Amino acid sequence: MSSTYPYADRFPVNATMPVEGRDRAEIIAELGDLARAEDATWETGQCSGTMYCGDHDHYDFLGEVFAQYAHVNVLQRDMCPSATRFEGEIIAMTLDMLNADAVEGAKPVGMVTSGGSGSILHAVLAYREQGRQNGIGHPNMVKPETAHPAFDKAGFLLGVEIRSAPVDPQTTQVDLDALAGLIDDSTVAIVGSATNYGYGTIDQIEELAELATSRGVGLHVDGCLGGFILPWGEELGYDLPLWDFRVPGVTSISADTHKYGYGFKGTSVLAFADQELRNGQYFFVTDWTGGKYCSPGIEGSRSGGLLASTWAAMVSLGREGYIHHARGIFETSYAMQDVVRTHPELRVIGKPSFCFSFTSDELDIYHINDFLRTRGWRLNGQQYPDAIHMAVTRPQVRDGLVERFTADLSEAVVYAASGLTDPPSTGAIYGGVEGGPSDESDEFIRAVMADMMDRHQDVPARP
Ligand SMILES: *Cc1c(COP(=O)(O)O)cnc(C)c1O
């Protein structure tokens, strides 16, 4: 695989620590080249998700803010009071956006985590600990199968069993009876998504909240993707169901500042309807030789740069800025969905909004994806059923993009319908690992993951 090691043909590979340090200007020049090459794949706007903002002026601004706080360790609050301001205000602004003032009889709070998976991990931890308080030794959580794998990962890490309820393949709505049937005395919470990643559809949050309340368990709403855009869609008058703290029974919500919040990668907000649930997952040691240790989350030391730049993203945009960008995203997404619907062979799945997926009952949808790739598109493949997915983000909001999609999709349909015998080259991948058979063994998958970290070892040393 050495031939595929990135940039091995252009630069020496650092297989050991260089003895002498390199010139800063030379490093900056080298990175500039690489970063510009990397930008090129999404700058055309033909890419699903990934780059939520895409505005280099905004990135430069965040970079300037980041630089002022990059070196600050926010674990040491006595030395960086501004981190307390940034974090507190990120949480307050997010609670405001999520209508936490509708919560009755409890004190809504939050925490800033390292991303969507980080928020989900802390939520699962909070419910596990709440369950433990109630004597639950082997906790489980119940999710629609469409909920993000970060829940399964959190379950793996924290010893919480994650049970999946089936969804209707046409509407993607979870089977509420099946989900209720998975709840037992050891269930600590159920999960709903607004929206789920795969289909961009919103689970029946009001029904799930009623169920959670009646069974005395929590309800986590995964708004990692939708949290920072659905509120603005509602203000713009789009037909969207309620899913936030206005729904009684919603006990926590994750909302990613590093997606539609347009912050740098590395932050997300986990909001709780009640302070007690959050406080229960705090970890501290009071009798350590190094002193009393307390950290507000799973991370220890954290960079002040991420808090400062996330805060700056939010206050520089404000509600008006977010609504402005949301308008373009919703309009583009609905226009692209209309384009898909002009093809009777294709079917938009469920009732999505800013993010959607589509399949075909007649054609191999991966052949469609193959063709679109030749035209520069990077949509994501999905499975059960096979489908392709488009999370519309700001890079797609531009003149001519929908027209281009219209033309390319028409050709893709003709291509897929032309009696192809070759199997498609694309499949269902999330997380950027490509290649290999579709039914990989665990060992194969481990090898592919490890290869990303280890590949340099096979690159021949150069003089
Ligand atoms: C992206 C996403 C996550 C996970 O977030 P990361 O930031 O990638 O860790 C969880 N849930 C949904 C719905 C998402 O879209």
Image: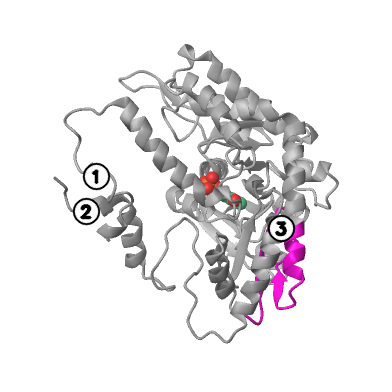
The boundaries of the magenta stretch are 335-363
Which residue is rendered at x = 83% and y = 41% of the image? Answer: 235
Instruction: Name the residue tied to disc 2.
Output: 459
Task: Assess whether residue 15 is covered by the magenta stretch.
Answer: no
Residue 315 visible in rendering? yes
Is the Cβ of the residue at disc 2 closer than 8 Å to that at disc 3? no
Q: Is residue 41 left or right of residue 14?
A: right
**Residue nearer the viewer, 41 or 193:** 41
Q: Amino acid at mark 2?
A: Val
Is the Cβ of the residue at disc 2 closer than 8 Å to that at disc 1? yes
Q: Is residue 12 left or right of residue 354?
A: left
Which residue is rendered at x = 83% and y = 50% of the image? Answer: 238
- Spatial separation of the CA atoms under disc 2 and disc 3: 42 Å
- Spatial separation of the CA atoms under disc 2 and disc 1: 8 Å
The residue carrying pointer 2 sits among few (fewer than 14), some (14 to 19) or many (20 or more) residues within 10 Å by Cα, namely some
First in sequence: mark 3 or mark 1? 1
Whether 312 is drawn above or below 179: the answer is above
First in sequence: mark 2 or mark 3? 3
Decide if ligand 1 comes within 8 Å of the CB at mark 1: no
- Spatial separation of the CA atoms under disc 3 and disc 1: 41 Å
Q: Secondary structure at mark 2?
A: loop
Decide if ligand 1 comes within 8 Å of the CB at mark 2: no
Q: What percent of the width, then of the height, locates residue 246?
A: 79, 41
Question: Which of labels 2 and 3 is toward the front?
Answer: 3
Question: Which of labels 3 and 1 is toward the front?
Answer: 3
Q: What percent of the width, then of the height, locates residue 303?
A: 45, 26
Q: Secondary structure at mark 3?
A: helix
Which residue is rendered at x = 54% and y = 27% of the image? Answer: 307
Q: Quadrant of residue 85?
A: top right
First in sequence: mark 2 or mark 1? 1
The circle drawn on residue 13 is 1
